[in-house]
Image (cartoon, helix red, strand yellow):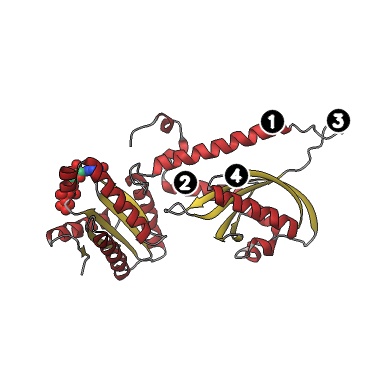
Amino acid sequence: MQNLPWMTTDVLSRLSANAGILLIRSLWEYCPEQMFIVRVEGPGNYVIEAMNPTQQTMFGDERSCIGKRIDQLFPSPLCQGVIANLARCVESASPIRYEERSSYLDRHGDYREGHWQTLLVPITDQGGQVTHLFGVSRELLPVASPFGTSRPDNPELERRVMERTAELVAANQKLAILATRDHLTETYNRRHLLELADIELRRAFRYNLSLCLMMLDIDHFKEINDTCGHQAGDRAIRILARTLMATVRECDLVGRYGGDEFLILMPETTPEGAREIAERVRRTLEQSGQITVSIGIASLEPDDRFIDDPIHRADTMLLQAKRNGRNRIECPA
Ligand SMILES: Nc1nc2c(ncn2[C@@H]2O[C@H](COP(=O)(O)OP(=O)(O)OP(=O)(O)O)[C@@H](O)[C@H]2O)c(=O)[nH]1
């Protein structure tokens, strides 16, 4: 990727995936603000999926809240307000900031008056669907003045700070997309996919999980370029990317490896499961009548040390699929 000017100063973009995860974990554990993750189950239906320790000191033990719907956790007026804001964030699919005042039941079962400032950030799946919302909430406590009167409010300044913060969050999201996605297809770019693949490889070894990879490439792609032009070639690549995103499972990671070649990581998948997914992709494309693909599959083996090892085997299988006639899948016996 071209070295854009902001990349030299943006520390986050230089972090490895592991360092990024460590950073997020530390923030989650030690941040004095309340943090939570809500699962979007449908209109008006939001389920608490996680709360950081700060949030737990307010609402009580995480175990008593996880898996509960918002309307089971909050009393009525507050609950409607919370749900309306969650819905607004899902609808706009972009970060929102808001303030709310309400009474709520604390972890001791006592009613308290609260005033919060909250930032909600949507988390999308690879298809762009908002599946979760990440929230950071700060309780605004009245500040005692040394002169005995409350500090004068400055609503205009506060509004401008909130606007600017929302702009920065949106800009950061755009930068994150630029750094992690392929410009032509919006699937993961090679660098980011390999970072994610490395995490999946460690996770698979640590928890003794299966992991499969699929490497695929459009058949006779050069001919499409040579006879119909480069733009038609680009269109074919986009058709393949869209089909992959729509056909593989939500947990599979799709990335453009280079040219017309795509790599798909299938966590917690056996070779039989991987073959089924590959067959679905192959058949869908064949039926579209526009392009066909050849697919090589490999699974993680105990001696693998780096993600390049199974990638190399998937690539060899892909070559074999090409040699054996194309529009087919090859995986180790
Ligand atoms: N349109 C377009 N073409 C690209 C892009 N990246 C690489 N290519 C072209 O992809 C072609 C490589 O295609 P191959 O996968 O080797 O295709 P092939 O040899 O015709 O077919 P197979 O043997 O079936 O794989 C070359 O002509 C490259 O110039 C891109 O982003 N867009």
Residue corresponding to mark 1 = 157
Secondary element type, mark 2: helix
Mark 3, residues whose alpha carbon is within 10 Å: few (<14), some, or many (≥20)? few
Q: Quadrant of residue 2?
A: top left
Residue corresponding to mark 3 = 147
Nearest to N terminus: mark 1 or mark 2: 2
Residue kind at label 2, given as amino acid type: Gly
Q: Is residue 189 above or below residue 157?
A: below
Between marks 4 and 2 in the image, the one whose residue lies nearer the viewer: 4
Between marks 3 and 4 in the image, the one whose residue lies nearer the viewer: 4
Nearest to N terminus: mark 4 or mark 2: 2
Image position, residue 128 (x, y; %) = 45, 51
Q: Quadrant of residue 151?
A: top right
Residue corresponding to mark 2 = 20
**Residue at 59 percent of width and 33 percent of height:** 164
Secondary element type, mark 1: helix
Image position, residue 55 (x, y; %) = 66, 54
Q: Is residue 101 above or below residue 277?
A: above
Residue corresponding to mark 4 = 96
Between marks 1 and 3 in the image, the one whose residue lies nearer the viewer: 1
Cβ–Cβ under 8 Å for marks 3 and 4: no
